[in-house]
Image (cartoon, rainbow, N blue to C red):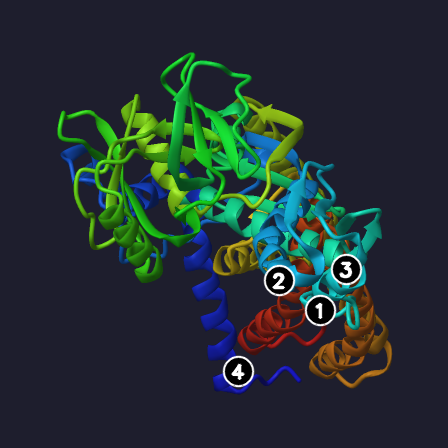
Amino acid sequence: MLQFPLWKRLIIIAICVIGTVIALPNLFYSRVELSNDAVTAIERGAPETPELAAQRGEWPRWMPHELVNLGLDLRGGAHVLVEVRTQDVHAERLEGLWPELRDRLRDIRDQVGTVRRLTGTADELRIRISTPGGMEAALQAVRDSAQPVFSLTGAGSREYEARAEGDQIIVTLSEAEKQAVDERTMQQSLEIIRRRVDETGTREPSIQRQGADRILVQVPGIGSAEELLQIIGKTARLSFHPVVNQTSDPNASPGLDNMLLPAMDQPGVYYILERRSVVTGEQLVDSQPSYDQNGLPAVTFRFNPAGGRAFGDYTAAHIGQPFAIVLDNQVISAPTIQSHIAGGNGIISGAFTVEDAQQLAVLLRAGALPAEITVLEQRTIGPELGQDSVNAGMLAGLVALAAVALYMTVTYGLFGLFANVALILNIVLIFALMAIIGATLTMPGIAGIVLTIGMAVDANVLIFERIREEMRTARGPARAIGLGFERAFATIMDANLTTLIVAVILYIMGSGPVRGFAVTLGLGILCSIFTAVYVTQMIIGAWYDWRRPKSVTV
């Protein structure tokens, strides 16, 4: 067992050396981070100023530059818990059914008479027919147009239900459709929030769904929760609508198929617009901050082919008429169409600052949230508090390492020193693996590392105690050492495998801090098996080949 073949020694040495090199940048965290930020800024199109070039040169690019990301509790940043108002999407879904149902009922006008939409609650669509005798035919036409719900749980269900109430048809979404809409809304909200946060260049944000309609967003390194809400809190729903009229009366009646919206930068001015939009922000493929013909900040945009075609056809047919640009139920501007706008390109101008234009471009590129969000909780963790946590975690780790190293040295002598070398390599390899997989280190993660320090020497204790037993019966120290490693291996694997299973379950079932603990614990177990068994065995084997002692004291 002590005679390691050369290839095995080379593999073990290579793993230790490569792991040490990969983990090395974490000793120069600030310099490497500054260099990485500068490289990212240049890749995003920032001009390469002398200052930026100097920051990039803080760390050689030929060296590994992956860092262990620090979590919110170690770095400071923003914590926001929001609730997605999925009920708003239900109302929009019903709103979208009206044109189709209206056309269906008009096809059987000889049976139902005239068709008129009535004002109802947000969770229902009310349609009145003038010939109550044709109610059965009307209900059948409405029900026939309902499509199956596209979800696993809604198999066999239709997207909406219809019932008669006098001369009115009441249309409501089915429960299966509501669940499917809620699920789609949450998934879309998660993706759009993730895109918005990624656009800002922040490192390792944590964006998780909590419960049925809540999203937790934690972004390390950001200045405040208010700054984060400026990014994720706006719906950023862009649409273009024909203008019916302009008024100064906030209580003016717009009509059933119209809507009354205020002007964003003109207090007291309101626009009556057609509810039907010509194009929407969902058809945008790009948006960039720019300047208009007067040199004022603006935002350029570009539609996809379908959106560009609809935009071009409308502007060609309505030259000389006003056309409103609406963002989150406010009219940004309502310019008059001067000519046919082909190609699907345009510019949004208004009372923007440079920062406003940049932020709006980011929001439009990432896409609009499908529903408004309500802030339930917001917290800002200052960098000083984060640094205090880092210092406390480092102190805890150093104290644990020193105590374990002292115990191993006093108890097992030279073999204890060998175990301490393996223990240090174990910690180095944990940081190397975390840097490779992009894991985030949190305070619970530090607790996992401290626990790993204690668990890592357990394997060596089992091995050394086994060697002690074998020394009483084995022929010579080499045989005793070999049998000690061989017979302790199964016990070591069983003990670590059970703990690894617990770490995997914690990662799958847990969230946030629990996952951080599970990651470092799991990586620590894998590294400790490697270092405690193979690295320690190789070191002891090399020492024995060098000294050839007649007896060994453990």
Q: Mark 2 highlights which residue? A: 104
Residue 155 occupies quadrant: bottom right
Q: Secondary structure at mark 2?
A: helix
Sequence-wise first label, 2 or 4: 4
Evaluate if marks 3 and 2 touch, with contact meaning CB atoms under 8 Å apart: no
Q: CA distance from mark 1 to mark 3?
A: 15 Å
464 to the left or right of 104: right
Q: Mark 1 highlights which residue? A: 144
Q: CA distance from mark 4 to mark 1?
A: 71 Å
Count of all numbered marks drawn on residues in the image: 4
The three-letter code of the residue at mark 4 reads: Lys
Q: Secondary structure at mark 3?
A: helix
Q: Secondary structure at mark 1?
A: helix
User: Which mark is nearer the camera, 1 or 3?
Assistant: 3
Sequence-wise first label, 3 or 2: 2
The three-letter code of the residue at mark 3 reads: Gly
Q: Mark 3 highlights which residue? A: 134
Q: Residue at x 52, y 20 (%)?
A: 252
